[in-house]
Image (cartoon, rainbow, N blue to C red):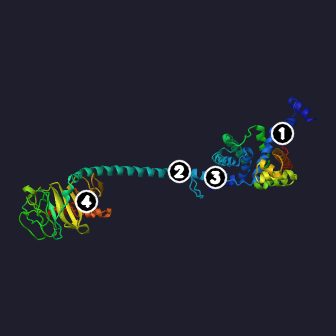
Amino acid sequence: MSCANAWRRLSHSNVCEEDMRDQEHSNPNRIRGRQTAVDGILLSHFGRRPSAALEGALRSLRATEGEPVAGGTISWFTWRKISLATAATVVILLTGLIVRYAVEQARNRQLTTELAWIEQIAETNLVVKGEPTNAPVEQRVLLGGGGGPGLGTPMIGGPIRFGALPGGLSAGGTKGGRGGGDDTAIGGGGIVEGGQTGRMRGGPGGVHGHDNGKPAPEFGFRFQMPDRIHRDYRLRTSAPDTPKRVVLLYMNGESVLRVFLSPSDGPDTPFAAVHLKSRTVVAGRKSGLLIAWENGPTEHDDYERFAAQFLSPIVEEKDGNEGKAKEGE
Amino acid sequence: MDAVETFSILAREHEQMLHAYLLGLVGDPVLAQDIAQETFVKAFRNLHNLKASEAFPTWIRKIARNAAYDHHAERAREIPTDPATIEGMEEVFSAFDDPQLGDLWSERVKRVEACYQDLPDQLREVSRLHYFEERKAADIADSLAINVATVWKRLERARDELRECMEKTLALERL
């Protein structure tokens, strides 16, 4: 039985399956498909084109599926966890930096405000003339605020043009009556005991060293005024005439180093450069004292040590041991 | 051994086959390589869709074909979409999938080299210039001092003879 007859019996169709298959296989499109396949094989085999497709795909997969290119064992999930953790860390660090920046900006704004008075002092007011002091190198402490007769003898030479420090300065071992009596005196009521302890006895501000007999202000805060500081700068004079502010001028040859002190409420802040309108100073708050300077140490590591020289030992003592401080008084 | 590494072993085995398939399909070697790369990535991500009864080579060729259609805008020539044409291609490649012909694709297609050697001189020369040296028809025509139409005709005859040779060699009953 021929294929066609058999197929007719089974399917009542006039077309044999084999015939259909033959027709299908001789379909020009199918032949074209075979030719296309052969063409591709020939091009690939004889053309010897290197195919980097797989390597490219594997690199891509390893990068996106969490596999290190070198062929490690970190799973995609681990890789994703690491990525998320890294992203979270970056966000936290950035937030920290932003907060820190904002805090520093706020601190700088506050310091700038508090240091505004420095700007108000005319440059000429901060220039001193005359010979450097021969005062002995010793610690001197000024304690503002009335009380007690002046015992010190003014020892710091040079004209004081804008008010004397309240409180006479006593050279080591020298004790005297009220603060000095000529233009060169840093006179006032404040007295420093000679020697090393620097205990302040205080006294009303004197008229010495101040123009027109105007009473020198009394200081309402404690600070220390060393004779010699950083790089052999020596204390020359101080200004201005307000009980809440003082400028100490140190000289080494022609070079002038200025220290600005004023009481300041608030927590201690690190010392850092503060840009004022007309000048840049290094400033910070320490033990309730705002300390700023120009031409002082430029290394961060030296700031704290330098500033500590102007802190009253009594204040520091209080910080460290209040009982001893009271005892000292 | 991680999943990518395992996949790379499987994919490497079929890399050349896929290259040949895509070259036949799109004609442009650069586009073929791009599509092949895309195909491997898609295949890896869809491995879970590979049915146990389905052969990997057939499955990956299907992915490659669909990827080629996605690149229709970049195609250098018309990509065949007619089902009969695709089936024709599939018949040839399926025949070469037979592991009895060799473990590697390169071993299996070595039979093509024998067929090539059996080609008449004229056809072999044109084929050499076209497939080995990848020269264009016009260039071949200049080299052989014949016209371009003759080059195309000889290339077509060469392909037909190679196909017939492969039918016999591979005993492809259905071809």
Q: Gap in Å between the C-alphas at discs 1 and 4?
A: 99 Å
Where in the figure is residue A240, as x and y percent of width and height? 16, 56
Q: Nearer the viewer, residue A201 or A173?
A: A173
Where in the figure is residue A287, as x and y percent of width and height? 23, 58
What residue is shown with label 4?
Answer: A293
| Dot 2 amino acid type | Arg
Q: Are marks 3 and 1 in contact (CB under 8 Å)?
A: no
Report the quarter where the C terminus of chain A lies.
bottom left
Evaluate whether residue A321 shows in this view. Answer: no
Label 4 SS: strand
Q: Gap in Å between the C-alphas at discs 3 and 1?
A: 38 Å
Between discs 3 and 2, the one toward the N terminus: 3
Q: Nearer the viewer, residue B80 or A7?
A: B80
Q: Residue at x 22, y 60 (%)?
A: A259
Q: Nearer the viewer, mark 3 or mark 2?
A: 3
The mark found on residue A80 in the picture is: 2
Q: Nearer the viewer, residue B75 or A162?
A: A162
What residue is shown with label 3?
Answer: A56
- Do the dots labelled 4 and 2 sit on one chain? yes
Label 2 SS: helix
- Do the dots labelled 3 and 2 sit on one chain? yes
Callout 3: residue from which chain?
Answer: A
Between discs 3 and 1, the one toward the N terminus: 1
Label 1 SS: helix
Label 3 SS: helix
Q: Residue at x 29, y 52 (%)?
A: A108
A277 left or right of A226 in image: right
A221 left or right of B140 in image: left
What residue is shown with label 1?
Answer: A25
| Disc 1 crowd, CA 10 A, few/some/many (<14, 14-19, 20+) | some
The mark found on residue A204 in the picture is: none
